[in-house]
Image: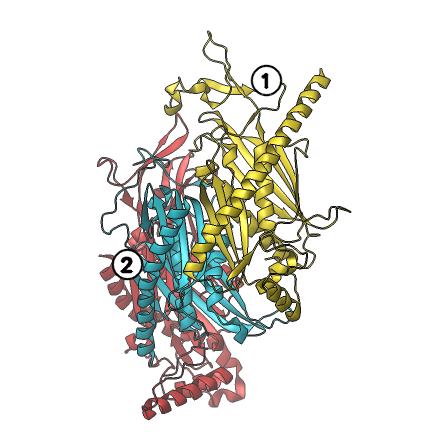
Chain colours: A cyan, B red, C yellow
């Protein structure tokens, strides 16, 4: 909030705070998970996936899993500028939160969370793209989070959208990457946790893989879980990833039919 | 019709369909021609009285077909106090309003703030790179700030306690797909998002120097409220491009925009009164007087261009208003 | 990451060596051997806890090796209104440009960012949070700044960072605080050892009434304070470098550049028997199947448990040495 004056933008007052509410429904530290109403703990949120929405891009995808809404576009392969010769292409991932995407307004500056989500998504995609086919080139993957509901969901949905957009752009890949999160809440494993649920979790895992090849591309685990819980989480996530894979493949097939 | 997509079109795998294969080839050819000679490409279309995306050339009487389809969707983003998604053709803008509390300015102790900003991220078009706002985004934000600051939302209605506490509305628009005429789309998105805002009940407690809000639905005596919007002053933008001093192109697309000599934006209120006019590029009418010997060759425009734009905008307004009211109710 | 560029021939030579039976490594180690680790705590006199760690330093001339300096500085933070009663932990990793001469300043920033993120996410998680970082409930608490400086990188920087962080946190002494009251006349001073001071006054939850304790002071005492609560829980990390179906530990820079993927696992030990996983990351683009990942997770336990036991033994030695030093210094001051 300090010294946010930026002559390149319209500036508001020097300092402003999000509204403070009386009688908060629950304390932020409360550790009691609220039972899910509409789905079982082993179910993911329904996925809406639309490839090719951004016509200006080479490839794009929009994904919505209940409240999480993410748009992703792919530009390239295009010439890498200002870099030395590289026989492999470069996969560049940039993630941005829209200012209105979270509970608190995000000032329009890059912060730590953007970068760590970008790193996680890049890692998830890296083993899937045949970068050796694109020497001297860069493939730019831009992700905008329009509404976030938990950082785990953002990474998982962001990776799915990015992989779909890469496929939509016609970039050579080994397989589609799908991704799923799981949280250890008390003694249970809750798949695809929301923000509220992961706040109460002991630990969370985001697993990205190429289900068609049985290859893990990324694991992003935080918090505390025992090794056996971790293995159970991996099983739960990889199972859901296989389900998501068919959703993504169907979405791509439909959009390819529409295009011709 | 050939799309403005810069990517190579993915070849179809089906071998038997020769007719679709030929069509594909033709479309490919057209796309290549467009990339190499964008100006001639557009000229050839306009000679045929049609625009590259299939729209007709605007005439005063048949206004609707000259504009792209508008879609408005409000309130889909729950983390924002108010939100709207607007699509004009392929151009897509998402706008979210975040309400925060601040201390009012010393000069205007009983006024809040309205802070509109547009982001043109690298995601929306190949012409933008990641980083700070581009010049185009800065100009756009500035223009929108002027238009929205016309009194449509009285800033005094954002005051909670004079001199101590007021609402600041951050109106942030993010362009998702940049296919031309971003100004109209963003203005419409901002207006619709503002109309969608629900502010929680807020009261200032002088004892602790804090403003306390009530979550909607908790206390029926302290309901949340909509913004006080002067319907008469709500601005609607209509942009035009003038191509080759001869054609008025309403609602220009991304492939047309870089070829325009002049862009004109007409801002109307809901009673079709002109609130503002902005023109970028050469003055269209004086151009003809100065152009001398070539005057006979150009299909001279007899009418006053600006007046024609205003009347086209007025015709369009009626259609747009219907659309917006449909989605708001 | 910090990859030195090596030729394709060198890369395939290193990979072939690791896959050979018996495996060959340039420095003669077996696949799961570590280089020599040296560790000293209490090296920065003005910090509340510090450690200097190096992996693979040449025992003869003291050159080479990954070299890390970790330091903890406690800072009093005003928490009025915020919902953080027990203090905060903030980690930051900086890399000396001399450790990464081949990186541009932008790439160095990104590297620091990434290392900071991995460390911060693992160490500041609520499940590891020490309970004695509060000073006055709802008013003041300690902000624990853990700063790590990578002065040289000869490979395996993640393991080294976590080891150094653990040693510095182990070494950290939280100054004893005594709350001071101004209001009630009968008990002018309510002395206490830690944050439990105000447990009897429920006023902390009443925003309208000011809490009794309004300020605190630091009493003079022979040691520098008490250790962080639950300091034996601070985690250790192991990086498994993967080459096809084999993995090896403690890679040098050349070895890091020639293996496609790395698996970083961070374990915390409640007791010495079974660990909890505090963080797990895959870095790199080599193929890794799910069964393989699972077997690696199991194997990582044996490595971290060895590391944990030997580190603990070393840290307890250091404790004795440090306490003697502190006692002498205190005596000398009088």
Quadrant, the N terminus of chain C: bottom right
Please provide percent x and percent y for residue C64: 72, 50
Crowding around mark 2 (Cα neighbors within 10 Å: few <14, some 14 to 19, many 20+) is few
Q: Secondary structure at mark 2?
A: loop
Decide: is A143 above or below C309.
below
Please provide percent x and percent y for residue A170: 43, 75
The numbered disc on residue C219 is 1
Residue B114 in sight: yes
Using residue C30 as the reference point, say whether residue B133 is left or right of it: left
**Among all residues in the image, which is located at the extreme right?**
C61
Label 2 to label 1: alpha-carbon separation = 59 Å
- Please give the name of the residue rendered at 30% of the width and 61% of the height, measured from the top-left corner: A47
Residue C119 in sight: no
Using residue B129 as the reference point, say whether residue A36 is left or right of it: left
Which residue matches tag 2? Answer: A46
Q: Secondary structure at mark 1?
A: loop
Please provide percent x and percent y for residue B76: 30, 56
- Between residues B329 and B157, which one lies in front from this camera angle? B329
**Among all residues in the image, which is located at the extreme top?**
C186
């Amino acid at each position: 909030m300090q010294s946010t004056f930026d002559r390149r933008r319209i500036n508001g007052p020097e300092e402003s705070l999000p509204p403070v509410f009386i009688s908060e429904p629950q304390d932020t530290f409360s550790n009691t998970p609220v039972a899910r109403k509409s789905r079982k703990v082993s179910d993911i949120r329904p996925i809406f996936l639309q490839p090719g929405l951004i016509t200006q891009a080479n490839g794009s995808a929009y994904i919505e899993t209940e409240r999480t809404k993410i748009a992703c576009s792919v530009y390239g392969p295009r010439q890498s500028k200002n870099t030395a010769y590289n026989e492999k292409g470069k996969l560049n991932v940039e993630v941005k939160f829209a200012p209105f995407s979270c509970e608190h307004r995000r000032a329009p500056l890059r912060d730590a969370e953007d970068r760590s989500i970008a790193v996680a998504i890049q890692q998830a995609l890296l083993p899937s793209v045949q970068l050796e086919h694109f020497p001297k080139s860069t493939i730019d993957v831009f992700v905008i989070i329009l509404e976030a509901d938990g950082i785990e969901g953002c990474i998982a949905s962001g990776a799915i959208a990015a992989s779909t957009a890469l496929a939509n752009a016609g970039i050579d890949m080994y397989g589609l990457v799908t991704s799923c999160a799981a949280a250890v809440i008390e003694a249970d494993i809750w798949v695809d946790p929301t923000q509220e649920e992961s706040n109460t979790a002991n630990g969370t895992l985001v697993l990205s893989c190429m289900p068609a090849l049985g290859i893990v591309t990324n694991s992003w685990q935080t918090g505390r879980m025992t090794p056996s819980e971790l293995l159970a989480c991996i099983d739960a996530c990889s199972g859901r990833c296989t389900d998501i894979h068919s959703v993504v493949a169907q979405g791509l097939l439909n959009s390819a039919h529409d295009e011709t | 019709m050939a799309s403005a997509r810069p990517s190579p079109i993915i070849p179809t795998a089906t071998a038997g369909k020769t007719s679709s294969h030929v069509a594909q080839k033709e479309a490919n050819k057209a796309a290549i021609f467009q990339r190499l000679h964008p100006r001639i490409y557009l000229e050839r279309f306009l000679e045929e009285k049609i625009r590259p995306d299939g729209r007709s050339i605007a005439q005063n009487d048949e206004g609707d077909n000259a504009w792209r389809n508008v879609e408005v969707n409000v309130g889909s983003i729950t983390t924002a106090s108010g939100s709207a998604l607007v699509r004009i053709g392929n151009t897509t803008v998402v706008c979210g309003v975040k309400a925060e509390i601040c201390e009012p300015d010393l000069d205007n102790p009983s006024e809040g703030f309205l802070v509109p900003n547009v982001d043109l991220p690298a995601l929306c078009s190949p012409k933008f790179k990641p980083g700070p706002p581009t010049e185009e985004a800065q100009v756009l934000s500035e223009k929108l700030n002027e238009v929205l600051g016309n009194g449509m939302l009285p800033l005094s209605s954002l005051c909670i306690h004079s001199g101590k506490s007021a609402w600041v509305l951050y109106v942030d628009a993010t362009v998702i797909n940049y296919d031309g005429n971003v100004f109209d789309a963003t203005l419409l998105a901002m207006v619709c998002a503002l109309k969608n805002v629900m502010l929680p009940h807020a009261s200032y407690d002088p004892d602790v120097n804090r403003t306390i809000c009530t979550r909607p639905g908790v206390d029926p005596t302290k309901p949340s409220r909509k913004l006080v919007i002067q319907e008469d002053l709500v601005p609607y933008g209509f942009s035009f491009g003038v191509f080759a001093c001869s054609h008025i192109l309403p609602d220009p697309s991304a492939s047309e925009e870089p070829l325009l000599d002049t862009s004109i934006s007409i801002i109307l209120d809901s009673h079709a009164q002109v609130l503002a006019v902005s023109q970028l590029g050469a003055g269209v009418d004086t151009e003809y007087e100065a152009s001398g010997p070539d005057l006979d060759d150009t299909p001279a425009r007899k009418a006053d261009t600006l007046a024609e734009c205003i009347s086209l905008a007025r015709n369009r307004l009626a259609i747009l208003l219907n659309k917006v009211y449909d989605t708001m109710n | 990451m910090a990859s030195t560029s090596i030729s394709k021939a060198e890369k395939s030579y290193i990979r072939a060596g690791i896959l050979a039976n018996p495996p060959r490594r340039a420095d003669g180690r077996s696949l799961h051997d570590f280089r020599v680790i040296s560790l000293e705590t209490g090296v920065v006199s003005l910090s509340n806890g510090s450690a200097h760690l190096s992996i693979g330093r040449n025992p003869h001339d003291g050159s080479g090796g990954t070299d890390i300096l970790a330091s903890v500085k406690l800072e009093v933070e005003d928490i009025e209104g915020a919902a953080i009663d027990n203090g905060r932990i903030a980690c930051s990793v900086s890399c000396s440009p001399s450790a990464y001469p081949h990186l541009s300043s932008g790439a160095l920033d990104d590297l620091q960012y990434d290392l900071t993120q991995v460390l911060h996410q693992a160490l500041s998680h609520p499940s590891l949070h020490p309970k004695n970082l509060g000073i006055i409930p709802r008013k003041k608490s300690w902000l624990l700044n853990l700063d790590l400086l990578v002065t040289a990188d000869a490979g395996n920087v993640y393991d080294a960072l976590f080891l150094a962080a653990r040693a510095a946190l182990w070494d950290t002494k939280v100054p004893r605080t005594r709350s001071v009251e101004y209001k009630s006349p009968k008990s002018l001073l309510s002395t206490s050892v830690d944050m439990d001071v105000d447990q009897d006054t429920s006023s902390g939850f009443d925003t309208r009434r000011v809490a009794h304790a309004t300020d605190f002071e630091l009493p003079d005492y022979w040691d520098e304070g008490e250790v962080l609560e639950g300091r034996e829980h601070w985690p250790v990390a192991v990086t498994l470098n993967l080459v096809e179906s084999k993995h090896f530990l403690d890679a040098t820079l050349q070895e890091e550049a020639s293996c496609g993927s790395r698996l970083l696992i961070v374990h915390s030990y409640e007791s010495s028997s079974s660990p909890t996983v505090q963080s797990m990351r895959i870095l790199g683009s080599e193929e890794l199947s799910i069964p393989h990942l699972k077997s690696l997770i199991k194997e990582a336990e044996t490595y971290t448990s060895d590391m944990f036991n030997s580190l603990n033994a070393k840290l307890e030695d250091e404790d004795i040495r440090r306490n003697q030093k502190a006692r002498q210094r205190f005596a000398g001051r009088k």
